[in-house]
């Protein structure tokens, strides 16, 4: 069984529909993989690998809000201190806050250190 790490690049190919399709992957195989590795890929398990990375977690009032909060909590609990977070009352696609989203990302990027 091969473990997937955060540094492992994805092997992908164009889907022909404007997206990316992973070679040899089906919906069923993805569901099986999540079932088999879900605990290995949880935020709690991956948090120690994220503690030395600059993270920006932007979240809204949507179906992944709880996951965003879990990620923030788990990274901080693992010792992460370079995590910026912002909650905005909007929908999943930030449809009425697109300029705010852009500004949050640009302002965060400007705080990152330059090349060594």
Image: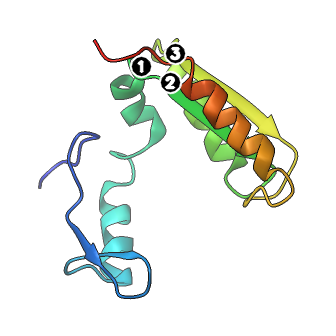
Quadrant where the C terminus lies?
Answer: top left
The disc, 3 or 1, on the residue closer to the chain's N-terminal end is: 1
In the rendered image, residue 98, in percent from the top left (x then y), is placed at 77, 52
Which residue is at 48% across, 15% downward?
A: 80
Which residue is at 34% across, 72% downward?
A: 30
Which residue is at 42% across, 29% downward?
A: 47
The disc, 1 or 2, on the residue closer to the chain's N-terminal end is: 1
Dots 3 and 1: beta carbons under 8 Å?
yes
Q: Quadrant of residue 48?
A: top left
Query: Does residue 14 appear to the left or right of 60 in the view shown?
Result: left
User: How many angstroms separate mark 1 from mark 2 (CA)?
Assistant: 6 Å
User: How many angstroms separate mark 3 from mark 2 (CA)?
Assistant: 9 Å
Is 80 above or below relative to 40? above
* Mark 2, residue position: 75
Q: Which mark is residue 51?
A: 1
Q: Which mark is residue 82?
A: 3
Q: Quadrant of residue 19?
A: bottom left
Q: Nearer the viewer, residue 22 or 29?
A: 22
């Amino acid at each position: 069984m091969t473990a997937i790490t955060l540094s492992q690049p994805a092997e992908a190919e164009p889907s022909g529909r404007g997206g990316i399709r992973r070679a040899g992957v089906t919906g069923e195989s993805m569901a099986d993989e999540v079932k088999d590795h879900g605990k290995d890929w949880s935020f709690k398990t991956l948090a120690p690998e994220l503690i030395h990375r600059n993270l920006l977690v932007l979240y809204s009032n949507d179906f992944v809000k709880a996951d965003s909060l879990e990620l923030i909590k788990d990274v901080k609990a693992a010792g992460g201190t370079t995590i910026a977070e912002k909650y905005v009352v909007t929908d999943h696609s930030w449809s009425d806050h697109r300029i705010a989203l852009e500004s949050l990302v640009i302002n965060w990027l400007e705080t990152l250190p330059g090349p060594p």
